[in-house]
Amino acid sequence: MRMLRKNKQDMYYSLFIDEQEIYETDDYGNIKYTDVIEDGVVVDRIPISAGIDKAHYDTPVPFSSSISSKLNPLQMKAWGVDQSNIWSQINVPKGYLPLEVGALVWRENDIQWEDAEETIPRASSADYTCKGIMTEGLYEDLYLLQRNSSEGKDE
């Protein structure tokens, strides 16, 4: 299916890199450590885990695509979802996007950053998370996006 340029919207995507362990910090933001002592001498310092892993994503990449904010009953059945109001679908030419399940997509929200260098995006600022991929079509790939909650987003 050919896509009209006027129907395309500018967006960004970011791919999942890895999860990193979060450590407990003191009142000044310094990581807390447990000292390993042998014969009365500190031989090692081990950071104290907060018991949380935080997902890290790659630097966002711009792209243009059409996006459908409503799924019809046939599409919902194909994707195996039951509520169309939280789902959207991106249609792109075959092989155009390297999206994976778990990738983030920004359409309306500004990208917020975890670091001062603006290389690590804040996942909570994304509009959508990719939840499904259909690459069976001859000429296009389809990506199922779930709208992220607006709760907890930084202003």
Image (cartoon, rainbow, N blue to C red):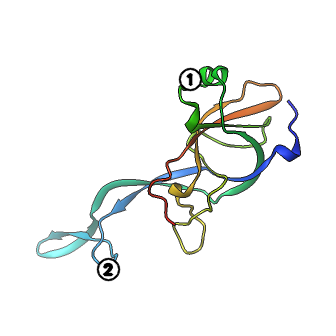
Q: Nearer the viewer, mark 2 or mark 1?
A: 1
Q: Nearer the viewer, residue 61 or 109?
A: 109
Q: Position of residue 17 (x, y in %)?
A: 55, 52
The residue positioned 11% from the left and 75% from the top of the image is 40
> For numbered disc 1, what is the local secondary structure?
loop
> For numbered disc 2, what is the local secondary structure?
loop
Question: How many other residues sit within 10 Å of disc 2, few (<14), some (14-19) or many (≥20)?
Answer: few
Residue under label 2 = 28
Q: Looking at the rendering, which quadrant does residue 92 occupy?
A: top right
Residue under label 1 = 80
The residue positioned 29% from the left and 59% from the top of the image is 50
Q: Is residue 99 left or right of residue 5?
A: left
Tell me the CA gap for discs 2 and 1.
47 Å
Question: How many other residues sit within 10 Å of disc 1, few (<14), some (14-19) or many (≥20)?
Answer: few
Q: Position of residue 83 (x, y in %)?
A: 54, 30
Q: Looking at the rendering, which quadrant does residue 113 occupy?
A: bottom right
Q: Amino acid at mark 1?
A: Gly
Q: Are marks 2 and 1 in contact (CB under 8 Å)?
A: no
